[in-house]
Image (cartoon, rainbow, N blue to C red):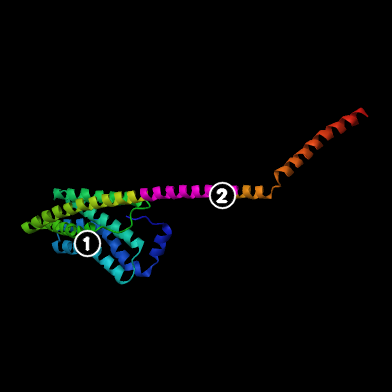
Amino acid sequence: MMKTNKKELIKDLKNPRAIIPNLLSTSRMFAPLVIPPLVISGNIPLVLLATTAFLSTDFLDGKIARAFNGQTKLGQLLDQISDKVCSIGLLLALIPSIPLTIVPLALESTIALINIKASTKEHKGDGKSTQCGRLKMWPLSISIISGYSMLLSSSIIFEVLTHLSILTTAALEVVNIKEYYELSKSKDDEEKIKATNQVAENQKQKTKNNQKQKDITYTEITEYIQQCPSISELNEIKEIISSETTIQPKEKTKQKKR
């Protein structure tokens, strides 16, 4: 999850080329509100159609955005939020019937928390998914579609496909979490190195400024010495000044006597 300011989001919202991709991404947020009621109705074809349609938007929004040059930070943000709302909501509804779905649900929730935490830091959350993150969406989508099909059909095919896809999704989610951790650690190391280099550069600049000041002072002293009269002339000036200071008190005492 990336960090953006309000001005960028408002500007992206007004981009006409990004309207269709953004609508497709946003539509996935409504999947947890639509699909479970359809399952209760018992309409298998409609459940399969709706589930496939919602999950397919995850692959269509990016392609359409690239085709129409409508890639925006708002679109990336909507895509990430919609993915988590859709997957977590649909998996949550499957837990009573398929307890194994709690594994990908917990891992997907962990990934969502990592993204939220990353979005609070300037150097994290660049809006780009990892390769494993994009790959896991396929078995995750299959597990959700076959899982809801399993609720409406007693076919062993749906049961086997659901459990295999859930285990595959969980394995890829573990790798994805590891990738995010390593990426976060490398970014932290880069920031530490950058901060250390900045401190060293500041110290170097400070030393350079001090040396420059010393050079200026030395130059001024040298010029002053060069402009000064000889030592004998300085002694004569000193004698004149001292004699004037002795004469002035004597004149003051004479004035008092008068």
**In this figure, which residue is indicated by the disc labeled 1?**
55
Question: Which residue reaches farthest bottom?
Answer: 68
**In this figure, which residue is indicated by the disc labeled 2?**
215
Q: Nearer the viewer, mark 1 or mark 2?
A: 2
Residue 155 in sight here:
no
**Residue at the image point whose x is 59% and y is 47% from the top:** 218
Task: Say if 64 sits above or below 9 in the image.
Answer: below
* Magenta stretch, residue numbers: 192-218
For the residues labelled 1 and 2, say whether their Cβ atoms are less than 8 Å apart.
no
- As drawn, the label of residue 166 is none
Question: Which residue reaches farthest left?
Answer: 156
The amino acid type, in three-letter code, at marker 2 is Asp
Instruction: From the top left corner, tell me how far across and down residue 93 is, in percent.
Output: 20, 52
Of residue 256 and residue 96, the one placed in the foreground of this image is: 256
**Residue at the image point whose x is 91% and y is 28% from the top:** 257
**Residue at the image point whose x is 15% and y is 57% from the top:** 143
Instruction: From the top left corner, tell me how far across and down residue 140 is, in percent.
Output: 18, 57
The amino acid type, in three-letter code, at marker 1 is Leu
First in sequence: mark 1 or mark 2?
1
- Dot 2 falls on a residue whose secondary structure is helix
Task: Say if 244 sits above or below 15 in the image.
Answer: above
